[in-house]
Amino acid sequence: MDLSKFTVVDLTALRDAILIEMKTRETAAIEKARADISAIAASVGIPVAILMGKASTKEAVVKNKGVVKYRDPSNQDNQWSGRGRSPAWVKVLEAAGKLDSAKV
């Protein structure tokens, strides 16, 4: 491409168009890389923060709520792992002797 035939206005417009296109492609490449990294991390069960060195495995374990062991028979959204303080709905089932029926 012979740039000597372009005017200063044309060269400025071309430069601006090139910068915009470069920024657009860079943004698209970053988004694709993030999606790829997230997919890889999810496929092996590792949080992205740990994979990127932004969190320790200890922090991830602390944030893990655990596997659901109990579900409220009257409201399936109420779940409990069996760890920590028992929710009110579990106390009601325990008092009624029906906690075993809530086990997953």
Image (cartoon, rainbow, N blue to C red):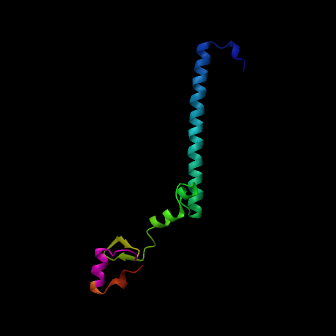
Residue depicted at x 54% and y 64% = 57
**Height in image: 49 above or below 87?**
above
* Res 48 quadrant in image: bottom right
> Depth check: 88 or 20 in front?
88
Query: In which quadrant will I find the N terminus?
Result: top right
Q: In this view, does 102 lie above or below 50?
A: below
Q: Position of residue 54 (x, y in %)?
A: 53, 54
**Quarter that holds the C terminus:** bottom left
Q: Which of the 4 image quadrants contains residue 51?
A: bottom right
Query: Which residue does the image show at 60% across and 48% down from the upper left?
Result: 33
Query: For residue 25, which quarter of the picture?
Result: top right
Residue 14 point in image, percent of width and height: 61, 22
Q: In this view, does 94 lie above or below 7?
A: below
Q: Is residue 57 left or right of residue 86?
A: right
Magenta segment: does it hold 91? yes
Query: Which residues are the magenta region?
Result: 82-94
Residue 11 falls left or right of residue 87 = right
For the view shown, which residue lies furthest in the bottom direction? 97
User: Residue 11's spot in the image, x, y percent?
Assistant: 62, 17
Where is 45 relative to 1, above or below?
below
Identity of the residue furthest to the right in this view: 2
- Count of all numbered marks drawn on residues in the image: 0
The residue sitting at 33% across, 77% down in the picture is: 73
Task: Give x and y (percent) for residue 100.
Answer: 37, 85
In reply to whether residue 63 is colored magenta, the answer given is no
At horizontal 55% and vertical 58% (from top left) the residue drawn is 50
